[in-house]
Amino acid sequence: MARRMIEGIEIEASSGNVFADLGLADADKLKVKSGLVIEITRAVQRLGLTQEEAGRRMGIPQPKVSAMMRGDFTNLSERKLMDCLARLGYDIEIKIKPTSAPVGHLTLATA
């Protein structure tokens, strides 16, 4: 990451993944999961659902909905989060393609 000084303050440019910038393990996975949670939160708000209604629709208990919407999604897999989005009226498309890098990475693209 590039560093530069602005008005005497050292600024470090982001890699585009805050989890990687923080040095967390599974940064790509966390970025994908957080993106899914953001979309779930938007869907719940757009549909005007309470957490209880959202939980019933997504097939998870209300306390897990509450935790997820507060940013605690470590106990939910990417697969479960995608299932939640599908139950809220979203289509999920997974695209796999070869990479020129030695190791590929996970990304999330939203419409």
Image (spheres, grey):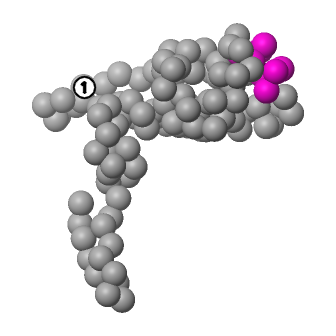
Q: Residue at x 82, y 21 (%)?
A: 52
Q: Quadrant of the C terminus?
A: top right
Q: Residue furthest top?
A: 59
Q: Residues within 10 Å of mark 1 (few under 14, many from 20)?
A: few
Q: Secondary structure at mark 1?
A: loop
Q: Is residue 90 visible?
A: no
Q: Is residue 87 magenta?
A: no
Q: Position of residue 30 (x, y in %)?
A: 42, 34
Q: Quadrant of the N terminus?
A: bottom left
Q: Residue at x 53, y 37 (%)?
A: 35
Q: Is residue 64 left or right of residue 97?
A: right
Which residue is at the front of the view, 44 or 89?
44
Q: Position of residue 34 (x, y in %)?
A: 51, 36
Instruction: Count numbered badges in the picture.
Output: 1
Q: Main secondary structure of the magenta part?
A: helix
Q: Residue furthest bottom?
A: 7
Which residue is at the front of the view, 104 or 18?
18
Q: Residue at x 86, y 33 (%)?
A: 48
Q: Is residue 106 left or right of residue 108?
A: left
Residue type marked 1:
Pro
Q: Is residue 57 magenta?
A: yes
User: Which residue is tagged 1?
Assistant: 98
Q: Position of residue 60 (x, y in %)?
A: 68, 13
Q: Residue furthest front?
A: 63
Could you say which quadrant of the image residue 45 lies in?
Answer: top right
Q: Is residue 17 above or below residue 89?
A: below
Could you say which quadrant of the image residue 49 lies in?
Answer: top right
Q: Which residues are magenta?
A: 51-58
Q: Residue at x 32, y 87 (%)?
A: 8
Q: Position of residue 76 (x, y in %)?
A: 53, 19
Q: Is residue 106 visible?
A: yes
Could you say which quadrant of the image residue 47 lies in?
Answer: top right
